[in-house]
Image (cartoon, coloured by chain):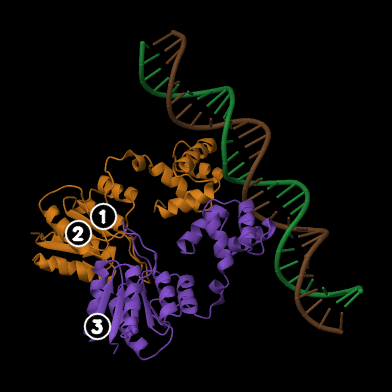
Chain colours: A orange, B purple, C brown, D green
Amino acid sequence: MFKKVLVAEDLDSISLAVVQVLEELQVPVIHHVKYCDEGLLKIKKALADNEPYDLLITDLSFKSDHRKVTLNSGDELIDAINKVQPNIKKIVFSIEDKSYRIKTLFNELGINAYVSKGRNSIAELRNAIESTFNNEEKILSSDLSFNFNDKALIEIESYDISILKLLSQGYILESISKEFKDLSITPNGTSSIEKRINKLKIYFKANNNVHLIAIAKDFGLV
Amino acid sequence: MFKKVLVAEDLDSISLAVVQVLEELQVPVIHHVKYCDEGLLKIKKALADNEPYDLLITDLSFKSDHRKVTLNSGDELIDAINKVQPNIKKIVFSIEDKSYRIKTLFNELGINAYVSKGRNSIAELRNAIESTFNNEEKILSSDLSFNFNDKALIEIESYDISILKLLSQGYILESISKEFKDLSITPNGTSSIEKRINKLKIYFKANNNVHLIAIAKDFGLV
DNA sequence: GTAATCCTTACGGAAACCCGTAAAGCGCCA
DNA sequence: TGGCGCTTTACGGGTTTCCGTAAGGATTAC
């Protein structure tokens, strides 16, 4: 079994359960942090001491409070850790159940397992830890049964997300076009952007921009 | 201390912690349900048996799965319970931290305490249970420090929420007007509705309708 | 080298919005 | 009854979205 595990989870009520699972699995060293920044520090320290962690279990969303932080989410934490210790095994344990979000975690951040917090997630988490230890790939908790090869949501790319983000911030077409030109994102003609928004509206069956952003929010795309 | 407590919480990783707190407080009878419907049934059964619960601790949001349910949220559960056993003490334990949502829980559903899931929520929950037992009123976990008498968010009433809801569903002004006429909600002229939306835009500093709905989603208003 | 195709951009008219102003409706009170 | 204040509604013009059509440019096929 894993020898040294780091848990990043802000909710104390949940971390309690995670740590309990790790103890049952007889993991000798279990550390727990409530802020992403702390997590990165611990990873770096362990590397410097030549006693690196071999598993990270992290949540995605962290509450913001008085404390000033540079890493705001599990995504950012994983991204930062990948730059210093890419070979570490990574399990995400989160409430998120949108396929788009989860796919990018596997494809872009290279996580090993995703466990969705739910009615039977403690058992799911235990299984995921064991499977990860046995070098299985792309482990998904059983309540998430979407197809990994489903093209549908993969087709929505970062370009679309950028448009949706700006729309949700109150930008009008022309401003989006200007912004894209500044950032050298192409295509950036108002007409092209308009066309792309139209595709999104058809895809999500939205009547208008307002409806589209409401749906995008529900899907966790923005 | 309380003699018989019902916990309604779908996430097993969290209910574990809640039950643990109750055990530490030496509550003799602790029941736990993962679905709201189950919760209502247990309450009714206990009443019929003349052994009613004296405390309810519930989450607000419950994941939907294959199972068909009639009560979808903690709000609905409390509302239903209030109809059969209004005198039961009620504590809400949820991640939600929007003052609008929480105020309506106190004002319209008559809950006794609200504890926000956070980095120190186990201790907060314990305190809230004890304070509730001692008949204190309107207990709020300490990380939520908004003023109860703050008029700002109270001014946003169900009329505004209705507009925002319809907007987020892709309705145009005229359709909203028609819908309001059908439901005999007044005012229902397009102009009045437009004016009200304008107020909301000023209040939330939104540039346009798209922006407004994005903000409303963030605030959990729709 | 030319045609076919796709992507990007431009254009224009109808619909919906945004925003200010003005009229109509309604309760209140003298 | 008539005037006052407030709310609701109507109206109008400027802006933005919405949606179809088409021109220009790049890539691919043959």
Q: Are marks 1 and 2 on the same chain?
A: yes
Label 3 sits on a secondary structure element that is strand
**Mark earlier in primary sequence (1, 2):** 2
| Residue A45 in view, yes or no | no
For badge 2, the amino acid type reads: Glu
For badge 3, the amino acid type reads: Val
Label drawn at residue B29: 3
Q: Residue at x 42, y 71 (%)?
A: B75
Label 1 sits on a secondary structure element that is loop
Left or right of A139, for residue B90: right
Q: Residue at x 45, y 75 (%)?
A: B105
The residue to which callout 2 is attached is A124
Label 2 sits on a secondary structure element that is helix
The residue to which callout 1 is attached is A143
For badge 1, the amino acid type reads: Asp
Q: Disc 3 is attached to a residue of which chain?
A: B
Distance from disc 2 to disc 3, alpha carbons, whole Å, reads: 28 Å
* Residue B170 x, y percent position in the rendering: 54, 50
